[in-house]
Image (cartoon, helix red, strand yellow):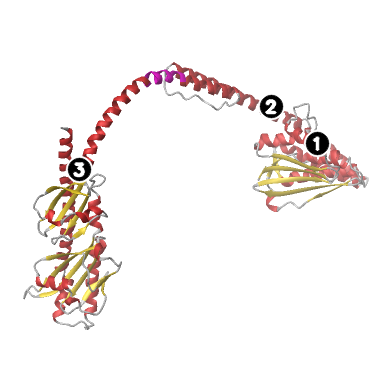
Amino acid sequence: MYKRSIEDTTNKHTIQMMGQVKNNVIHYFNEMENILAYLANDDKVTAFFAAAAEANAADPGQAPLRADVGKVIGIYENRHPEIAGILMVNAADQYVSNKLDRMIRDPLTSESWYKQAASNPDEVLLISKPIGRNIKAEHNYSADQVLSFVQAIKDPATGGVLGVILLDMELSIIQTAIESVSLGKSGFVYITDAQGGIVYSPVNPIVYRINNEWLESGYTSIEKTINNRSYQIMQDRFEHIGWKIVVVFPFDEAKSFVIKWQFYTVVIVLFTVFLAVLVSWFFTNSIIKPVRKLRRIMQRVEEGELHLRFEGRSKDEIGQLGDSFNKMVQEIEQLIHMVYSEQKGKREAELKVLQEQIKPHFLYNTLDTIQWMAQDRDADDIVEIVIALTNLFRIGLSRGNEHIPLEDEIKHVESYLIIQMMRYEGKLSYQINELPYQLKKSKVLKLILQPLVENAIYHGIKMKKGKGHIRIESEARDGKLVLSVIDNGLGMKPEQLEIIRQGVIHVGNPEHKDGFGLFNVNERIRLTYGISYGIEVHSEYEAGTRVEVFLPL
């Protein structure tokens, strides 16, 4: 019963698909015939054909008329991309076309298609595979790729033939209509003309083994064996042109469908039994899996990954336990952040207290008095050192501002170097490279160079035999402001350099007592600008030391 039902359904489906293809093809034929009718009744086209009785092909007055007809043809070609070309030939062998042209000088009026149309002026002729024509196409279409529609144009007054219109339609539009239907894996559709010649067929070896006499038998559906395989062949006719549409599909595909469903039935039964066994396992696993997941997250949180959260898909007891765990981890993370913020604020407060311990007005007044007393006694060296000390304190206080222009920071460290040169008369010299103009007003954290210069004097130059030199450089590098303090002091051995570098990072560790001043500068920079900025120390024993400060530009 199921087999018969499948066969009936397949036949109905095939008839429906065949009718759909037939209607689509007829639609395109009617559309091409309508275009020919519109062209035949167009004023410019009728004027072109009528002019053939009054002028010859060499008449220059025909050029504007042919141009107007070409524009009319272009309108239809642009709106219908399936048109491969339109050619109009009048009785004087004048022709107009945008995409078709004459190959040799032989008259087009002597072509077979022209004569057939002139002999049957009341019909639209369909010519499949138009070979042997004296016509070449713009895109070099072959005869197998086009279908020609030909219609004669009659004189309304005399009834005589004034010329012929030829329209080539691309067969690809019919191919698209045929390929849009589904006939299983091996089924296919093809079309024959009134003489039994194939108008369109897909690439299939079976189509050439179908005897044309089978289609002329009058049956709409027959069964034939081709290459030891049974096929059902169904056909239908295009009444007004005598063409046929033929559908071919193998019987074994429909039968295999029944066999497949027998197989599927057995598989479904076995699968149902298997599924019943798995249900209990999935039910148990739905409880165990979330617990294991929560346990793994707890272990990772214990290792410090406080950003992790348990994502429960249900609101059962496990989901509630996960929500409580998430809240606990979130509160721990907030507490750690709060402690960090408090420590940062405490450190900044300590720095401000240290800076405010100096009474600026008292120091300024005292230093001003010393400066005037030294000038009265012509003690120029004392005046110079007092001015340097005044600048040192003034810039260091900066009215409580934490950030100052780079040129003030350079002036501050220069004042410090002047004082130190007074102290170490023949022991120390310095050089401050010219500050680039675009960097002068850059805001930097104050009092970051003076501790580095102090380290260079006390731990580098002071330990060296002979005179020492300090150089300070400023530059923009890779989007950052880089300040460098370079000395030619004693330098450091690799193990000493590593201790200093560790001291900069781990000053709280008793193993790293050195580098406290460098740590303070580095810590202030990191607390202010983030961990992407800070200082780097480079040194070579008996060659000198270079300390680089990286700040945002």
- State the residue position of label 3: 251
Q: Residue 359, can we see it?
A: no
Please tell me the numbered disc located at residue 346.
2
Q: How far apart are the alpha carbons under marks 1 and 2?
A: 34 Å
* Left/right of residue 117 with respect to residue 374 in the rendered view: left
Based on the picture, tell me whether residue 286 belongs to the magenta stretch. yes
- Secondary structure under badge 3? helix
* Image spot of residue 9 (x, y percent): 16, 39
Amino acid type indicated by mark 3 = Phe
Q: Which span of residues is magenta-colored? A: 278-288
Q: Secondary structure at mark 2?
A: helix
- Say which residue label 1 marks: 495
**Quadrant in which residue 542 is drawn:** top right
Q: Residue furthest front?
A: 228
Give the amino acid at mark 1: Glu
- Give the alpha-carbon distance from disc 2 to disc 3, as whole Å: 90 Å
Secondary structure beneath dot 1 equals helix
Tell me if label 1 and label 2 are in contact, CB under 8 Å: no
Coordinates of residue 400 in the picture (x, y in percent): 71, 36
Q: Determine the image quadrant of residue 11.
A: top left
Q: CA distance from mark 3 to mark 1?
A: 89 Å
- In this rendering, the answer to whether 3 lies above or below 95 is above
- Residue 76 visible somewhere in the drawing: yes
Front label number (1 vs 2): 1
Whether 281 is among the magenta residues is yes
Q: Are marks 2 and 3 in contact (CB under 8 Å)?
A: no
Residue 516 at x, y = what percent?
78, 32
In the foreground, 441 or 223: 223
